[in-house]
Image: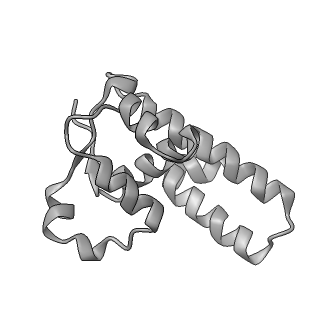
Amino acid sequence: MADSIAQHGAWHTYLKLVEARAAYPDDLSLRGYTEILRNTIVRDFLAHPKGMRSVPKLTAEFLSNFDRFNLTAQEGYLMSLIDGRLDLQKLLILSPFDQFTTLFTLAKLQHERAITVPQ
């Protein structure tokens, strides 16, 4: 797993683990590696210089071509909360989802370039 992360990055490795979990749903080691990687992704997302005071914003790409983003209901709800003024702390308060899931979903939206977290 470490080699894959070093060569291809955390998101590529995560997506490959998700594929493997679909093929082998009873494999507990795949589940464990997936959760470790999700934790790493959230930690990287929070490594922003402003941390929890970061204010995510919708990207121009999302605003001009939102149909290309095949959002889940959860992702769509979080996108509806992003107004360019609320920081991550406030989004966590407003989100009906647990904090980890909210942060992971925001990291995923950032990776897909639906949101940006300016410096």
- Position of 60 relative to 53 (above/below): below
**In this view of the protein, which residue sits in the foreground, 6 or 107?**
107
Its colouring scheme is one colour
**In this view of the protein, which residue sits in the foreground, 76 or 8?**
76
Q: How many marks?
A: 0
**In this view of the protein, which residue sits in the foreground, 47 or 54?**
54
Image quarter for residue 56? top left
- Position of 66 relative to 42 (above/below): below
Please provide percent x and percent y for residue 18.
64, 65
Please provide percent x and percent y for residue 117.
27, 39
Please provide percent x and percent y for residue 64.
13, 67
Residue for point 45% across, 66% down = 73
Q: Is residue 14 left or right of residue 118?
A: right
**In this view of the protein, which residue sits in the foreground, 60 or 27?**
60
Image quarter for residue 51? top left
Q: Is residue 76 left or right of residue 27?
A: left
Please provide percent x and percent y for residue 96.
50, 47
